[in-house]
């Protein structure tokens, strides 16, 4: 089984690249490759970087794709642990420790469809979730073959939620391994445009997936946050 790691970079320090490279090597996969996609100067969004890496992985004959942010640590996770969810899911993630809090996949707000990270550890090790965060997500080749590329309309944020939803709509199993945990350093917290980018991405996601009733309710309840014209509904 061949694994392709796809790491999308943006002004990432060489020392961080080397650290993550060593951590992947220490996992001891028997057959793997790493594709470093550098978006530092091309103006591409995260999804476009992911697509470029997946294409390279497909050409290399990969069976499993692992998409990662560079600001994560996989230290202490073995290849065997990493792949145990393979028997349960087609697209999966892991517990994620971020700023002292551990998260277990994501869900969506019932009405707003905004993304929510789950802080309560599930009772089962292998548990279904609505979406897997894009900071570290693994998926089988047949998922890529069935639903294609990540949606590049999202400049930043919600592209991972969108892909999970599309996979679920196509009958694939989505979940997390709650007993395997990686660390996310979350360098995006220093991004001064993060709130604007999140809002823009959420609007796109909401427009794409909300029912007419959800859109009408959002206009009534949150008119200041939506800012859509009638033609956009």
Image: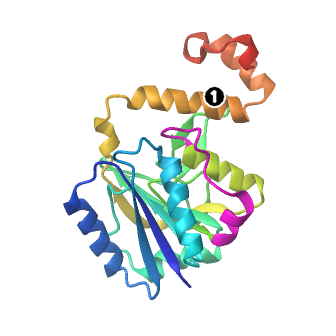
Q: Can residue 58 be seen in this view?
A: yes
Residue furthest toward the right?
A: 212
Residue furthest toward the left?
A: 15
Q: Where is residue 43 in the image (x, y as percent from the top left)?
A: 42, 41
Secondary structure mostly taken by the magenta-highlighted segment of the chain: loop
On screen, residue 161 above or below 214: below
Q: Where is residue 75 in the image (x, y as percent from the top left)?
A: 30, 70
**Is residue 124 toward the left or the right of residue 218 in the image?**
left
Element under disc 1: loop
Number of numbered discs visible in the structure rendering: 1
Q: Residue at x 39, y 79 (%)?
A: 78
Q: Can residue 130 be seen in this view?
A: no
Q: Residue at x 28, y 36 (%)?
A: 190
Colour style of the rendered protein structure: rainbow
On screen, residue 31 above or below 196: below
Q: In which quarter of the image is the C terminus?
A: top right
Residue 150 shown in magenta: yes
**Is residue 193 toward the left or the right of residue 214 in the image?**
left
Residue furthest toward the front?
A: 42
Q: Position of residue 184 (x, y in %)?
A: 35, 54
Q: Name the residue under label 1.
A: 112
Q: Residue at x 40, y 45 (%)?
A: 42
Q: Give the range drawn in magenta.
A: 141-158
Residue 149 shown in magenta: yes
Q: In which quarter of the image is the N terminus?
A: bottom right
User: Within 10 angstroms of label 1, few (less than 14), some, or many (20 or more) residues?
Assistant: some
Residue furthest toward the bottom?
A: 30
Q: Residue at x 55, y 54 (%)?
A: 132
């Amino acid at each position: 089984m061949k694994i392709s790691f796809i790491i999308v970079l943006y002004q990432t320090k060489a020392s961080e690249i080397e650290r993550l490279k060593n951590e992947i090597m220490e996992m001891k996969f028997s057959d793997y490759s790493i594709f470093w996609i550098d978006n530092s100067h091309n103006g591409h969004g995260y999804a476009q970087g992911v697509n470029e890496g997946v294409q390279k992985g497909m050409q290399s004959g990969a069976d499993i794709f692992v998409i990662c942010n560079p600001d994560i640590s996989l230290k202490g996770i073995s290849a065997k642990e990493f792949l145990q969810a393979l028997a349960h899911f087609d697209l999966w993630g892991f517990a994620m420790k971020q700023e002292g809090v551990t998260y277990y996949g994501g869900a969506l707000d019932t009405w707003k469809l905004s993304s929510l990270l789950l802080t309560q550890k599930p009772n089962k090790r292998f548990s279904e979730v609505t979406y897997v965060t894009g900071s570290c997500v693994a998926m089988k080749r047949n998922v890529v073959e069935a639903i294609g590329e990540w949606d590049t309309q999202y400049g930043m944020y919600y592209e991972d939620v969108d892909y999970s939803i599309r996979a679920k709509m196509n009958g694939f199993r989505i979940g997390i391994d709650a007993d395997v945990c990686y660390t996310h350093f979350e360098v995006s917290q220093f991004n001064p445009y993060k709130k604007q980018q999140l809002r823009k991405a959420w609007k796109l996601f909401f427009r794409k997936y909300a029912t007419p009733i959800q859109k009408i309710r959002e206009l009534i309840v949150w008119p200041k946050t939506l800012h859509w014209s009638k033609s956009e509904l």
